[in-house]
Image (cartoon, helix red, strand yellow):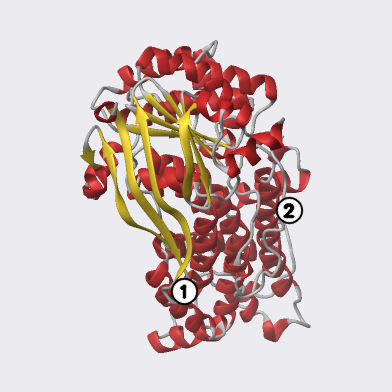
């Protein structure tokens, strides 16, 4: 299994510093995660346990006062932590893309959807504007949006939350990434829309064979979607296993607590 | 957004007045009843009449014509100053806000030091140093005015920088330049526009004020503030000399303020985003000459 992982995080440590340069928070403290092709890996934990910081660390988007102290992020065996800034830009969006929690906030409110989508395509591929537009339309259809022409001409505030999240996913899928990081993709949405979006993610994963790192605090989502589960607490992975293993037979007391809190 | 702007009567009225002023500045040679520089001492200090609708001044020059030509100096130069201010403050404010850290610290401390000088006095001093003259005055105004603009723009950038879409853009592999132009500045356009419209009234006042003090437009150039200044000795014998330039300045300043406020209200409507919550030290920056009220945009939610 080990060599098939598209994304392997090894002993990743991201610390935050106070103004005097002392370590204030060890947000991510020695995390190992493997994401496999065509599988959904869930990273579960309470708010503030370091889930989102883990995903941002993978993309190298940690800003001061935070710093990735050590560790490896292996994308198909290549350590992207050693990449130059320029190379890293090529990884983001093309190899690893990300879907955010609040689709309204994550889309630019003053750019039309079509423009944002075309931009995402043009960022990594040299195609004509016309072709970018064509592909944007197809992407919108692919994520299950009717009347893509109309959506291309809309601004975010003219769309519903579910539609925005589908657009967000379309942008993330623009360059057929190998890994999709979904950071609480359904937390900001209604329950019915949540189910639709999750189904959509599942379908896209099957179609494209990408690996998905699903970050969530919702164990219901985990049970429904995930193949592998990592439980995170205070910057550390406290338990990992298959979704059945975790739900049937939780070993760590924190996992038991988490499971206890929903049943 | 446009709809919401045009629904406000005040703002529309202001816009009409501004457009009329700009039209006047362009069409002055065609619509002015007389040559604004033509001295006619036989007909000096005349009250309004059909030949000179607003009367004549102490040298017999037609006041209406001088006011019309004065739009060119007063109004267009205000726009010019605003252009210079934005050209300096947008890059500086953006760099301070976006780069942050030590760069931000340095820029902000320098701005703090500059803000410690009373801006009008500083403008006076700079003009005095370079010698009176319209161009010198405009440069001096831009030199003192960009400071507060840069501060406010830095605040806007800081706020937009924190939004998820900037992070999302970076996660898509956008370069810093692209993030700044496509995401940050594009979202700052409307608040900067509001700021600029609200401020241009004060700039007009400042230009008139410095001209009134004899530092700006030199005679015989028609300029509203200089006209006011020239009318001082005749305030009792011929009050219309002072009245009409004064009213004109007031009208122009009010018109810009109405439009600015209208824009501000229109922009803070839900959905346009990006400028919902205006907060942070930037917007509480010390205002230079007149305006104190600015950005009362409340916190509103998207629906």
The image shows residue B302 at horizontal and vertical percentages of 69, 38
The image shows residue B112 at horizontal and vertical percentages of 51, 80
Residue drawn at 58 percent across, 64 percent down: B66
Q: CA distance from mark 1 to mark 2?
A: 32 Å
Q: Residues within 10 Å of mark 1 (few under 14, many from 20)?
A: few
In the displayed structure image, the side of residue A218 where residue A50 appears, left or right = left
* Secondary-structure class at tag 2: loop
What quarter of the picture does the C terminus of chain A occupy? top right
User: Can marks 1 and 2 be said to lie on one chain?
Assistant: no
Residue drawn at 55 percent across, 27 percent down: A165
Give residue A248's quadrant in the image: top right
* Secondary-structure class at tag 1: loop
- Residue assigned mark 1: A19
Compared to B256, does B213 lie above or below?
Answer: below
Mark nearer the viewer, 1 or 2: 1
Residue B29 visible somewhere in the drawing? no
Which numbered dot is residue B298? Answer: 2
Name the chain under label 1. Answer: A
In the displayed structure image, the side of residue A166 where residue B45 appears, left or right = right
Compared to B121, does A122 lie above or below?
Answer: above
Compared to B74, does A118 lie above or below?
Answer: above
The image shows residue A163 at horizontal and vertical percentages of 58, 22
């Amino acid at each position: 299994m080990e060599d098939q992982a598209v994304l392997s995080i090894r002993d990743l440590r991201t610390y935050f510093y106070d103004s005097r340069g002392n370590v204030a928070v060890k947000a991510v403290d020695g995390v190992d995660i493997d994401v496999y092709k065509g599988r959904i890996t869930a990273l579960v934990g309470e708010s503030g346990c370091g889930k989102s910081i883990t995903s941002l660390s993978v993309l190298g988007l940690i800003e001061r006062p935070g710093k990735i102290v050590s560790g490896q992020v292996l994308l198909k065996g290549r350590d992207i932590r050693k990449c130059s800034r320029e190379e890293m830009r090529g990884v983001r969006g093309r190899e690893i893309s990300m879907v955010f929690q609040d689709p309204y906030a994550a889309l630019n409110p003053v750019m039309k959807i079509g423009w944002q989508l075309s931009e995402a395509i043009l960022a990594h591929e040299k195609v004509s504007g016309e072709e970018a537009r064509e592909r944007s339309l197809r992407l919108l259809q692919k994520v299950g949006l009717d009347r893509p022409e109309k959506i291309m001409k809309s601004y975010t505030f003219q769309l519903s939350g579910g539609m925005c999240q589908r657009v967000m996913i379309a942008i993330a899928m623009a360059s057929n990434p190998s890994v999709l990081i979904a950071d609480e993709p359904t937390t900001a949405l209604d329950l019915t829309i949540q189910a639709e979006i999750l189904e959509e993610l599942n379908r896209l994963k099957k179609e494209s064979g990408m690996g998905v790192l699903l970050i969530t605090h919702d164990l219901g989502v985990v049970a429904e979607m995930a193949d592998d589960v990592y439980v995170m607490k205070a910057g550390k992975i406290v338990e990992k296993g298959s979704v059945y293993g975790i739900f049937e037979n939780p070993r760590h007391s924190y996992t038991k607590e988490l499971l206890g809190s929903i049943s | 957004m446009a709809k919401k702007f045009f629904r406000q009567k005040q703002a529309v009225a202001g816009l009409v007045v501004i457009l009329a002023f700009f039209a006047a500045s362009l069409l002055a040679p065609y619509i002015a009843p007389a040559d604004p520089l033509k001295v006619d001492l036989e007909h000096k200090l005349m009250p309004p009449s059909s030949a000179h609708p607003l009367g004549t001044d102490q040298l017999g020059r037609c006041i209406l014509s001088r006011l019309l030509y004065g739009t060119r100096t007063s109004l267009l130069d205000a726009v010019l100053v605003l252009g210079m201010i934005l050209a300096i403050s947008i890059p500086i404010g953006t760099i301070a806000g976006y780069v942050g850290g030590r760069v931000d610290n340095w820029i902000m401390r320098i701005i703090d030091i500059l803000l410690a000088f009373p801006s009008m006095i500083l403008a006076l001093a700079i003009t005095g140093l370079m010698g009176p003259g319209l161009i010198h005055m405009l440069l001096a105004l831009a030199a003192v005015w960009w400071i507060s603009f840069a501060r406010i723009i830095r605040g806007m950038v800081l706020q937009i920088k924190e939004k998820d879409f900037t992070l999302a853009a970076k996660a898509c592999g956008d370069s810093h330049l692209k993030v700044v132009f496509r995401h940050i500045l594009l979202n700052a356009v409307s608040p900067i526009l509001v700021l600029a419209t609200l401020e241009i009234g004060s700039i007009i006042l400042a230009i008139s004020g410095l001209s009134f003090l004899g530092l700006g437009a030199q005679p015989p150039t028609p300029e509203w503030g200089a006209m006011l200044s020239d009318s001082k000795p005749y305030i009792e014998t011929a009050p219309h000399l002072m009245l009409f330039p004064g009213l004109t300045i007031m009208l122009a300043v009010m018109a810009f303020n109405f439009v600015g406020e209208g824009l501000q209200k229109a922009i803070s409507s839900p959905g346009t985003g990006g400028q919902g919550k205006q907060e942070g030290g930037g917007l509480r920056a010390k205002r230079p000459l007149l305006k104190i009220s600015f950005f009362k945009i409340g916190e509103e939610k998207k629906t």
